[in-house]
Image: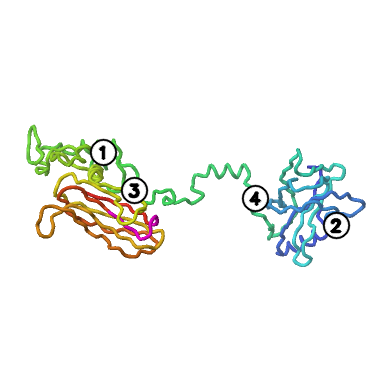
């Protein structure tokens, strides 16, 4: 930055300063920089820069002893389209009677610094701090742009070294709202076992165990104790292991325990499922046929179907059972839904159980309009 040789207060600045001594607010508004040359003008009579180039919002105000104040702003050439000589420097303030005025001014003359346009190889960013006279004014302020305020290195270091929780963080904010602010127990507290406002460590826990009398009996037994399962309330529990997947799916072992996983695997092994099939033939279409693992088997049947175009749909189960008159086993049909119209949509029929004497269990689906009904089925033994 060029050599300015100190700021001079203008006549309007002196008038505002005189008002400020009586309690009127002295409010700085901005800093102006320009390239104008003094050509005989009187600085005290100026009320603006001769050739204003940039108007900078304030980001700093610090009052000092000796009737002074430091006013600051940040300057960058990023928005400069035409380079200029930084020759003029002025601080503006708000006069309650005259409006905004030029409070103080300085001109670097031939010692001006050249500010190149932005977008080129030279990027300029600087903080401009101006020392101004405020006298004994009791009410000094500035219009500060909060987005331009930066902490100094000293302020940042002071904040980092502040260990007194400057942000007022609560224990709930760090996920410890249920943790009490208790100290670690002393050995005496651990061994007495009466303090309820301290935390135990492994060392304190061992000290507490060593302090209390050793165990003299177990389950009413003394000496070299040999426990049985009945001594610990497990007399009715068999010493079974966990079934393997093969044992779970076979369903024949009676000396193993099942887990939720093995139970799900067993259920899956007794379930037969067909993926969705398109009904393409007239009359009834067989979509799933299963031969139960043993005769006289109760099986469950569930059917899901969806209709692409409104049509009639009929679904039935074909299986082998005794006729109503008690004759030998023969083919039987059970309608899950008689032929009736269905609108476009998806439908799930509840599980239906049939007793299959022998042979196969078959799910059959018919549709009034072909290639518009999709069906799937599950048969569970």
Q: Nearer the viewer, mark 3 or mark 1?
A: 3
Q: Position of residue 3 (x, y in %)?
A: 81, 42
First-in-chain label (1 vs 4)? 4
Q: Secondary structure at mark 2?
A: loop
Quadrant occupied by the N terminus: top right
First-in-chain label (3 vs 2)? 2
C-alpha gap between disc 4 and disc 2: 29 Å
Residue 359 horizontal side relative to residue 162, left or right: left
C-alpha gap between disc 3 and disc 1: 61 Å
Which residue position holds label 2?
46
Which residue position holds label 1?
205
Q: How is the image coloured?
A: rainbow
Residue 300 horizontal side relative to residue 181, left or right: left
First-in-chain label (4 vs 2)? 2
Q: Position of residue 351 (x, y in %)?
A: 25, 56
| Residue range corresponding to the magenta coloring | 364-372
Q: Up-down: is 346 above or below 169? A: below
Label 2 neighbour load within 10 Å: few <14, some 14-19, many 20+: some
Which residue position holds label 3?
275
Q: Residue furthest top?
A: 224
Q: Up-down: is 252 above or below 324? A: above
Q: Nearer the viewer, mark 1 or mark 4?
A: 4
C-alpha gap between disc 3 and disc 4: 67 Å
Label 1 neighbour load within 10 Å: few <14, some 14-19, many 20+: some
Residue 25 horizontal side relative to residue 290, left or right: right
C-alpha gap between disc 3 and disc 2: 91 Å
Q: Position of residue 180 (x, y in %)?
A: 35, 49
Q: Nearer the viewer, mark 3 or mark 4?
A: 3
Which residue position holds label 4?
149
First-in-chain label (3 vs 1)? 1
């Amino acid at each position: 930055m060029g050599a300015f040789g100190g700021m001079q207060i203008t006549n309007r600045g002196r008038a505002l300063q005189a008002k400020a001594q009586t309690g009127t607010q002295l409010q700085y508004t901005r800093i102006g920089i320009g390239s104008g040359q003094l050509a005989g003008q009187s600085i005290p009579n100026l009320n603006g820069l001769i050739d204003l180039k940039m108007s900078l919002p304030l980001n700093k105000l610090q009052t000092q002893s000796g009737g002074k104040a430091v006013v600051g702003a940040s300057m960058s050439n990023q928005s400069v389209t035409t380079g200029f000589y930084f020759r003029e420097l002025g601080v503006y303030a708000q006069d309650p009677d005259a409006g905004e005025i030029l409070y103080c001014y300085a001109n670097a003359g031939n010692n001006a610094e050249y500010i190149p346009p932005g977008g080129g190889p030279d990027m300029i960013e600087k903080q401009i701090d101006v020392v101004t006279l405020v006298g004994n004014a009791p009410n000094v302020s500035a219009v500060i742009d909060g987005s331009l305020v930066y902490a100094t290195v000293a302020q940042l270091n002071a904040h980092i070294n502040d260990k007194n929780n400057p942000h007022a963080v609560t224990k709930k904010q760090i996920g410890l709202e249920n943790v009490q602010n208790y100290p670690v127990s002393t050995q005496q507290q651990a061994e007495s076992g009466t303090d309820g406002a301290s935390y135990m460590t492994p060392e304190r826990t061992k000290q507490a165990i060593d302090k209390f009398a050793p165990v003299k009996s177990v389950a009413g037994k003394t000496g070299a104790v040999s426990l049985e399962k009945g001594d610990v309330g497990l007399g009715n529990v068999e010493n079974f292991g966990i079934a393997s997947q093969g044992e779970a799916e076979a369903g024949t072992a009676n000396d193993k325990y099942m887990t939720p996983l093995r139970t799900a695997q067993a259920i899956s092994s007794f379930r037969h499922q067909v993926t969705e099939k398109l009904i393409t033939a007239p009359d009834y279409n067989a979509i799933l046929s299963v031969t139960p693992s043993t005769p006289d088997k109760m099986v469950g049947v569930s059917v899901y179907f969806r209709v692409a175009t409104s049509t009639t749909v009929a679904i039935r189960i074909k299986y082998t059972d005794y006729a109503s008159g008690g004759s030998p086993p023969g083919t039987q049909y059970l309608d899950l839904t008689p032929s009736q119209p269905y609108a476009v949509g998806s439908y799930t029929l509840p599980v239906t159980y049939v007793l299959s004497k022998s042979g196969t269990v078959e799910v059959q689906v018919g549709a009034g309009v072909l290639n518009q009904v999709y069906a799937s089925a599950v048969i569970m033994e």
